[in-house]
């Protein structure tokens, strides 16, 4: 057997690592991974060899059972299950998705504090556009499903998947004006905030007022701790677990605990710029001093023990000049995009399709309505129409300005990308229809998920095609000197 020389093997490993890092840093990479996860989930749910295994894995009980021996009267002194009813699927949707909503909350907070939503002038236009992009799809869905078993699913077509929308715009490159890229990004962030409010208000369970009150007291305590300048992560991690526990049993959807905690994480760094510069100068001097430890011989090793101490301190101080919120967002984003979201897609996009009728978006019954038509047309038509009309109203009312260098056709084309609901729409679908009979709930959720996937694909194709078309038309027009 021919052995590969060590240096060639090391070079190959370095090249592979560089390729992986380059892929991860691409704005469209997470979308590609999500699409692959969806395809795998659909195959697992529908192939005869994997269908039952897929279901059994998702239904596996993960609750901790603490039981004492059975007494003579047939009862137990201790009969405790935590968390009650926790399966693999619920673990993904109620625990892993908390981390997803936590990172979304961090991003929203950053944009509100110092980003595209930081001033009324910046925020008003995308916020109004996002509101229109939620109201019109909800209205379209309600027209198809009012008074039917599917009526509670109106929140499904109101969401925009920011990762896919931005990924497609990055692929299109300079065909999309920078101002419209910023506009859609800010709109998607405002849309995420709207989706969070919808989930919190309309898709929770029966509220336990006592537990909710305790959670509010704890949240106030965390807020006061923040105001007192507490910056250590552990002092927020432990209360975060307690808030999740209280939300889970209070009837508020547990993922909302992630959003709440995100808004309580401090954005200010532990050290200021003056402290950084002073310590950086001090440790830089020490690095040179430690090169000659005995004053008679130069130590060749770099860094030596003392220098390593200096470098660690410099790294620690530099890191803590950034707020905990920024650091957590930077750390968690790759894990969310390339682990949590693919796992979520694997668990929730696996829709069993008994027959081709599930793909018939025009299917309608007086009892069940049509989730497919409501979701499909809500995302594909409702989103761009709502975003464009709301933007037009905002501009005519002089509450906002049209993104510079853009035209109304191009704004409509970019708004079509807002119809890519995907992650958040599927998540809302998993929370909908729970008050119906189990078989009806399963049917409605399956129809909703298929409609979300179909509409998101069509919205991406439509938006991209219109952007390319309008660019070609613009290129053919004579340039005004």
Image (cartoon, rainbow, N blue to C red):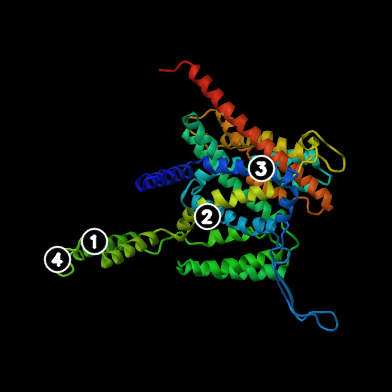
Q: CA distance from mark 3 to mark 4?
A: 72 Å
Q: CA distance from mark 4 to mark 1?
A: 12 Å
Q: Give whichever of discs 3 and 4 has the lower sequence position.
A: 3
Which class describes the residues within 10 Å of circle 3: few (<14), some (14-19), or many (20+)?
A: many
Residue positioned most to the front:
1
Q: Which residue is mark 2?
A: 106
**334 horizontally vs 355: left or right:** left
Task: Name the image quarter holding the N terminus.
Answer: top left
Q: CA distance from mark 3 to mark 2?
A: 22 Å
Instruction: Give the image quarter of residue 87.
Output: bottom right
Q: Is residue 275 above or below residue 162?
A: below
Q: Which residue is mark 1?
A: 301
| Residue at 40% across, 17% down | 481
Q: Give whichever of discs 1 and 2 has the lower sequence position.
A: 2
Q: Which residue is mark 4?
A: 297
Which secondary structure, mark 3?
helix
| Residue at 48% across, 62% down | 266
- Of residues 126 and 346, which is closer to you in this image? 346
Q: CA distance from mark 1 to mark 2?
A: 42 Å
Q: Position of residue 220 (x, y in %)?
A: 57, 68
Which class describes the residues within 10 Å of circle 4: few (<14), some (14-19), or many (20+)?
A: few
- Asked if the residues shown at circle 1 and circle 3 are in contact, with their CB atoms under 8 angstroms apart, the answer is no
Tell me if I can see residue 388 in this picture: no
- Asked if the residues shown at circle 4 and circle 2 are in contact, with their CB atoms under 8 angstroms apart, the answer is no
Which class describes the residues within 10 Å of circle 2: few (<14), some (14-19), or many (20+)?
A: many
Q: Which residue is mark 3?
A: 134
Q: Give whichever of discs 4 and 2 has the lower sequence position.
A: 2
Label total for image:
4
**274 horizontally vs 175: left or right:** left
Q: CA distance from mark 1 to mark 3?
A: 62 Å
Looking at the rendered image, the disc whose residue lies closer to the viewer, 1 or 2, is: 1
């Amino acid at each position: 057997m021919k052995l590969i020389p060590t240096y060639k093997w090391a070079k190959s490993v370095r090249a592979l690592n560089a390729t992986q890092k380059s892929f991860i840093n691409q704005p469209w990479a997470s979308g590609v991974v999500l699409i692959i996860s969806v395809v795998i989930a659909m195959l697992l749910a529908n192939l005869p060899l994997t269908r039952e295994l897929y279901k059994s894995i998702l239904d596996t009980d993960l609750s901790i059972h603490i039981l004492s021996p059975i007494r003579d009267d047939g009862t137990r002194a201790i009969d405790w299950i935590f968390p009650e009813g926790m399966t693999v699927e619920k673990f993904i949707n109620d625990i892993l998705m908390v981390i997803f909503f936590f990172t979304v909350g961090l991003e929203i907070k950053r944009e509100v504090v110092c980003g595209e939503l930081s001033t009324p002038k910046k925020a008003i236009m995308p916020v109004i556009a996002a509101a229109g992009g939620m109201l019109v799809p909800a209205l379209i869905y309600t027209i198809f499903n009012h008074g039917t078993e599917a009526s509670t699913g109106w929140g499904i077509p109101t969401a925009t998947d920011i990762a896919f929308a931005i990924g497609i715009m990055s692929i299109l490159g300079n065909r999309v004006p920078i101002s419209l890229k910023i506009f859609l990004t800010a709109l998607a962030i405002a849309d995420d905030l709207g989706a969070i409010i919808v989930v919190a208000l309309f898709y929770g369970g029966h509220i336990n007022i006592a537990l909710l009150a305790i959670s509010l007291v704890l949240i106030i305590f965390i807020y006061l701790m923040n105001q007192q300048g507490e910056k250590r992560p552990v002092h927020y991690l432990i209360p975060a677990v307690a808030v999740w526990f209280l939300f889970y049993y209070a009837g508020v959807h547990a993922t909302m605990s992630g959003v709440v905690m995100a808004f309580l994480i401090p954005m200010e760094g532990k050290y200021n710029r003056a402290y950084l510069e002073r310590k950086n100068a001090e440790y830089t001097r020490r690095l040179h001093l430690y090169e000659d430890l005995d004053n008679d011989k130069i130590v060749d090793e770099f860094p030596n023990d003392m220098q390593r101490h200096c470098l660690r301190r410099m790294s620690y101080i530099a890191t803590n000049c950034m707020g905990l919120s920024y650091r957590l967002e930077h750390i968690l984003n790759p894990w969310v995009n390339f682990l949590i979201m693919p796992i979520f897609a694997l668990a929730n996009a696996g829709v069993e399709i008994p027959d081709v009728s599930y793909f018939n978006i025009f299917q309608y019954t007086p009892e069940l309505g049509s989730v497919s038509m409501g979701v499909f047309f809500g995302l594909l038509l409702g989103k761009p129409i709502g975003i464009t009309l709301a933007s037009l109203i905002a501009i005519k009312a002089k509450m906002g300005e049209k993104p510079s260098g853009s035209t109304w056709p191009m704004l409509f084309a970019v708004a079509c990308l807002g119809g890519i609901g995907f992650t958040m729409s599927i998540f809302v679908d998993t929370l909908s229809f729970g008050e119906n009979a189990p078989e009806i709930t399963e049917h409605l959720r399956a129809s909703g998920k298929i409609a979300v996937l179909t509409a998101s694909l069509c919205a991406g194709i439509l938006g991209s095609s219109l952007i390319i078309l309008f660019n070609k038309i613009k290129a053919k027009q004579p340039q005004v000197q």
